[in-house]
Image (cartoon, grey):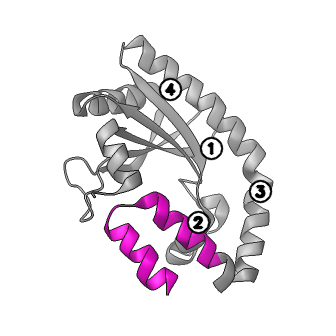
Amino acid sequence: ETMEIYAALAGRLGMSRIKNELEDLAFQHLEPEAYSVLAKRVEARRPQAETIISRMSGVIRDLIAESHIEARIDGRVKRLFSIHQKLIRQKIDLDELYDFIALRVVVKSVSDCYAVLGLLHHSLKPVPGRIKDLIAIPRPNGYRSLHTTLVGDHGTPFEVQIRTEEMHRVAEEGIA
């Protein structure tokens, strides 16, 4: 019921924070063995991921500062249920996941979003075919952001989401 109704409804309304929490809690109870195995694998990779998040946040922060664009940068490791779904859907292993690590860059304007994307693609190595312009073509629930996958100096791919403060608020809290 939680997965099929409440999490789905929260997702449809663009309330990602609530949807994510509901999905992870339900996953833990519906598939405890799969949850436990995946949680252990993710926790084993977390220290390295946190190091990459810290290092690449600094690199990106410096690049953006040189261009005099005001930005806030956050990083995270992908949620367990989201990882579980993607591994099943794409028939891949955890090591093949492009967005296990993600950074979010929040800026003031749409033009800043595209300027940051240009900076990142010019200075870091983008992964071919891994860019989504969800600002020009938003998702049906109103979600808007630029997504790209980059490879840092560590050789591990990571996703970067670029959006404005308003886009971030709607993505986290929903349209209402």
Residue wearing tag 3:
43
Give the mark nearer the N terminus: 1 vs 4. 4
Q: Which residues are magenta?
A: 1-27
User: Rounded to the nearest whole Å, what is the CA distance between mark 2 and mark 1?
Assistant: 17 Å
Instruction: Name the spot of residue 113 as percent of width and height, x first.
Output: 30, 33
What amino acid is at disc 3?
Answer: Glu
What amino acid is at disc 1?
Answer: Thr
The quadrant where residue 140 appears? bottom left
Residue wearing tag 4:
60
Relative placement, left or right, of 83 versus 149 is right
Q: Are marks 2 and 1 in contact (CB under 8 Å)?
A: no
Instruction: Name the spot of residue 121 as percent of width and height, x first.
Output: 39, 32
Depicted 170 relative to depicted 67: above or below: below
User: Rounded to the nearest whole Å, what is the CA distance between mark 3 and mark 1?
Assistant: 17 Å
Instruction: Report the front residue among 88 and 163.
Output: 163
Residue beneath the point at 30% across and 41% down: 166
User: Rounded to the nearest whole Å, what is the CA distance between mark 4 and mark 2?
Assistant: 25 Å
Q: Few, some or many C-alpha atoms within 10 Å of disc 1 (few <14, some 14-19, many ≥20)?
A: some
- In the rendered image, the residue lying farthest to the front is 176
Give the mark nearer the N terminus: 3 vs 1. 3
User: Rounded to the nearest whole Å, what is the CA distance between mark 3 and mark 4?
Assistant: 25 Å
Residue beneath the point at 48% across and 58% down: 17
Residue beneath the point at 68% across and 82% down: 29
The quadrant where residue 55 appears? top right
Residue wearing tag 1:
156
Residue beneath the point at 24% across and 47% down: 135
